[in-house]
Amino acid sequence: MRTKAVTTQAMADLQCAECPIRHRAVCAKCDSDELQTLEEIKYYRNYEAGQTICWAGDDMSFVASVVKGAATLSQTLEDGRTQMVGLLLPSDFIGRPGRAASPYDVTAVSDVTLCCFRRKPFEQMMVTTPHIGERLLDMTLDELDAAREWMLILGRKTAREKIASLLTIVSRRETAIGMMATPGPVMVDLPLTREAMADYLGLTLETVSRQISALKREGIIALEGTRRIRVPDMRRLMMETGDDVDGGLIA
Amino acid sequence: MRTKAVTTQAMADLQCAECPIRHRAVCAKCDSDELQTLEEIKYYRNYEAGQTICWAGDDMSFVASVVKGAATLSQTLEDGRTQMVGLLLPSDFIGRPGRAASPYDVTAVSDVTLCCFRRKPFEQMMVTTPHIGERLLDMTLDELDAAREWMLILGRKTAREKIASLLTIVSRRETAIGMMATPGPVMVDLPLTREAMADYLGLTLETVSRQISALKREGIIALEGTRRIRVPDMRRLMMETGDDVDGGLIA
DNA sequence: CGCCCGGTTGACTATGGTCAATACGTGTGG
DNA sequence: CCACACGTATTGACCATAGTCAACCGGGCG
C-alpha cells in the first residue's frame, strides 16, 4: 500500500463555482462572498484506492469534503473484528469541527479527491459564517438518520435482507433523485469488495458471497463483473429488504 | 396504557436558571437574555412509563429536551421486528428542526418530563440565536458518534459482549463524570425491561436473560431486583465488552 | 508461466433464535 | 388473608442461520 497523498494538479485550480458538489456539500448554502473566502483556504488532496486517509486516534490537521470517489469510516475491536460505520460519497463531510482526533479509520475504497480546509481557519469561518454551521447541522442530522437506518439493518435483518438493503441504499444514493421504485432495469455500481460489504453489514465475506449468488440464481440481480450489478426490477429487490414496500422512505 | 399527556403543575413554573439540565441541554450555550426568550416559548409535558410520545410518521408540533426520565427511539419492520436506535436521557433533544414528521416511534420507558418548544418559534430562534444551532450541532455530532458505537456493537459483538457494553454505557452515562474505571462497586440502574434491552441490542429477550444470568453466575454482576445491577468491579465488566481495555474511550 | 488476490462453493459447527414450561412479584377481588 | 391473574423473567430442549475452515476458480500482472 502506498502512503503518499499527492495534491492533484488536475484539481488544483478548480473554482468552487464549477465544483460538482457545490450544491450538496458543506458549502451549499454559502453565497458567492463566502465562497470566495473558502476558495482561499481550500486545497485538494488525492488518495488512491485502498489507501488509508487517517487511522483511528490520529490527529487530522484538516476537515474535508469528498469531491470524487468513495471512502469508508470503520472501527476495529482489539481482536481484529471490524465494522464499517460510514460510507462517504461525493459531497459527504470528513472530520469534526472542534476535535482533531478521528475516532475512526478513514479509508479510500476507490480513488478519492478531497477538498480540504485546515482545521483552524475552518473553525474560525464557522463562527463568522452561519451558513456553514447550518448546512453542517443538516448534513449531520441526515447522517444520524442514515446511521440509525443501519442500526436496524445490523440488529434485525437477515443476511439476505442485509444484502438487498445495501444494494437498495447504494442505488438510491447513486441515482440521487427522489427515487421511487422505477420499474426499468437499474445498474448499481458498488465500489466495495465482498469483504468491505461484509464489514459494512456485520457478516462474513463468505455469507455475502453466498447471498449474492442466491439472489443471482433467483434472477433478482445479475452480475456484470464482480462489482457491477444489474437490477432488472428494483421493486423485486426492495421486497427482499424486509422494509415496508414503500421502500422504507423516511417521512 | 393511558394516553393523556398532562402538563405538570410541579414543573409549570420551573425557571430555566434552576433547571437541572441547564448546562447540558440544547440551551447550554445561551446567555441569560436568550434564556429569557426561551423561557417565554417553553412549556412542560409529562408522560408516564410505557406511554407513546409519538408514532413513526406522526407530525410533532414541538421539539423538546428530556428533563427527567428516559425515552427510546425505535424502528419497526413490517413483520414486527423492532430495533431501538436511541436512548434519550435527561438533556437529550427530541425532534428535528425543519422536519415535522418523526421517522421513529418515541416511547417513554420511565415517567418522563419534557421541556417543549413549539416548532415554529424554535426554528425562528435558531436563526436569530446562533448559540442554539451551535449547541445542537455539537449534540448531534455526539449522537452520531454514539450511533456509530452502537453499529459496532450490533454488527460485530457477541451476545455476552453486547450485554456488557450496554451496562458499561448506561453506567457511564449515569455517573456522567469522566468515567475511568473506578475500582469500587458501582450501581447501574437501568430502566429497561429485558425485552427493551433485547430491542436495543438486536437480541431476543431470552438471550438477554441467559447472558445476564451467566454474568451473575460468574460474579461479574449481581442483581438487586431485576432492573438494578451491582457491579463489584467495573474493570472486570469492561473486559467483557470486547473493546480495548482502556474502555473504548473515543479520543 | 505461475503467483496472488478476490471470489465462490462445500462441509461442518456454534451461536443465538424459537417454542414451551416454569417461576416470581405485585395488585385485585373473594 | 389468601387465591388468582397478569406481566415480567428464567430456564430448558431443540433448531436454523450464519460463521469457520478449507478447497478451488479465474483474471491480471510480474
Image (tube, coloured by chain):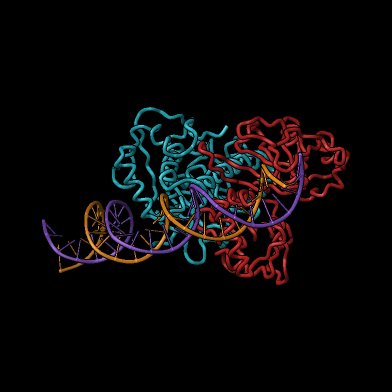
Chain colours: A red, B cyan, C orange, D purple
- Left or right placement of residue A149 versus residue A114 in this view: left
Percent across and percent down for residue B42 are 55, 48
Q: Nearer the viewer, residue B136 or B157?
A: B157
Percent across and percent down for residue B168 are 43, 39
Q: Nearer the viewer, residue A57 or B11?
A: A57
Q: Quadrant of the C terminus of chain A?
A: bottom right
Percent across and percent down for residue A111 are 76, 44
- Left or right placement of residue B31 versus residue B188 in this view: right
Q: Nearer the viewer, residue A232 or D3?
A: A232
Residue at (61%, 49%) from the top-left corner? A195
The quarter of the displayed image where residue A183 is located: bottom right
Percent across and percent down for residue A174 are 73, 57
- Left or right placement of residue A116 versus residue B114 in this view: right
Residue at (85%, 41%) from the top-left corner? A11
The image shows residue B249, relative to residue B55, as above or below, that is above
Asked if residue B189 can be seen in this view, the reply is yes
Q: Quadrant of the N terminus of chain A?
A: top right
Q: Nearer the viewer, residue B46 or A218?
A: A218
What residue occupies the far top of the structure in this picture? B183
